[in-house]
Image: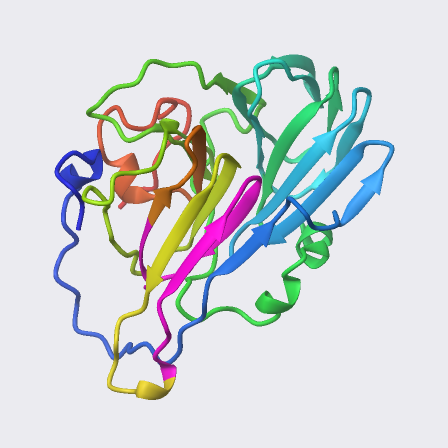
Amino acid sequence: MYDQSDPRASLAQPAAPKQSSHVHESYFGSQLSLYYGTEPQVSDENGKTWISRGQNFVIVYSEAQQGGVFSRSAQSDEYALIIPDVDTQVAITTKDGTTIVPGYSVAFIPPGDTSIRMLTDGNIVRLFTPKSEDLASAASNADAFAEPHPNVPPFEPWPEPPGGLRLKWYTLDVPDDPSRFGRIYRCTTFMINYLTPRVGPRARDKVSPHHHDDFEQCSLALSGAFTHHLRWPWTTNMHIWREDEHLYCGSPSVCVIPPPSIHTTTAESAGVNQLVDIFAPPRMDFSSKPGWVLNEGDYPMPKI
């Protein structure tokens, strides 16, 4: 259910479900990771790093020092980098050489031996799949995902571009378009929607409660404050019913919203509220909207 001012109201409605023996036999709740006011998982000469996860993704948030180096050896799949602040600058090294990437950008980094070197102080966010087992096991909420969550299908990457995976980066400095939902970029492993920042609280008569049948949403708060509202459908088995959740969080923080919870988020701060929605793998419905994915020409969609 989307407010008519929300571009998502134009998304195609899902087809009627096929006959299936599947019935939700269990639910699991949200996962809220507050990077402010909590101890980092890593604190060293590179800076401070907080790690949290969902079923199909690992979020690594770093307050990085100038000169810090974040390396991956024999990385098994493509990973993503968000550089939120315009004054931050990094050098990314892959097998093809070194590229200087400015702030207020997203980058997709290929598998293999790679590194990110901080040319300035600044915050960076790296996104990995659980194939990066060292990071997945280090997550503050790793115990919550000791077993697969039954409502999220196993992760399957999207197709590689012709010619294989190479470093790609994109500026976030693009004009707003009321017909498009945020600023969306995708790769083989992730979809990142860097939402238009909201100044001041969200109007309470223009919220958009909705649900996802079978994928998680990671909502990364970079500035301001938010309340994530979640409600689970009733089933014939009252033993799995859950109470509504209204999760207030400042920034930086992450909320993992599990399927099939009904959810919406309200900005709360009087200042700038910046939220980034992250999905692994990319969403087909957003990808199917012409012009919504700003780098759609660089990464093919799966064949249906």
| Residue 214 visible, this orientation | no
Span highlighted in magenta in the image: 240-264
Which of 67 and 155 lies nearest the eye of the viewer? 67
x, y percent for residue 276: 45, 36
Q: Is residue 170 left or right of residue 180?
A: right
Q: Residue at x 50, y 48 (%)?
A: 249
Based on the picture, tell me whether residue 254 belongs to the magenta stretch.
yes
Q: Is residue 290 left or right of residue 260?
A: left
Q: Residue at x 35, y 60 (%)?
A: 230
Q: Is residue 54 above or below residue 226?
A: below
Q: Residue at x 36, y 62 (%)?
A: 259
Q: Is residue 40 left or right of residue 257?
A: right
Q: Is residue 52 left or right of residue 207?
A: right
Coloration mode: rainbow
Which of 121 and 142 lies nearest the eye of the viewer? 121
Which of 130 and 182 lies nearest the eye of the viewer? 182
Q: Quadrant of residue 273?
A: top left
x, y percent for residue 143: 64, 68
Q: Is residue 58 above or below residue 300?
A: below
Q: Is residue 149 above or below residue 198?
A: below
Q: Is residue 288 above or below residue 132?
A: above
Based on the picture, tell me whether residue 28 belongs to the magenta stretch.
no
x, y percent for residue 271: 44, 28
State the residue lying farthest toward the front.
270
Which of 43 and 115 lies nearest the eye of the viewer? 43
State the residue lying farthest toward the right.
45
x, y percent for residue 141: 63, 61
| Residue 111 visible, this orientation | yes
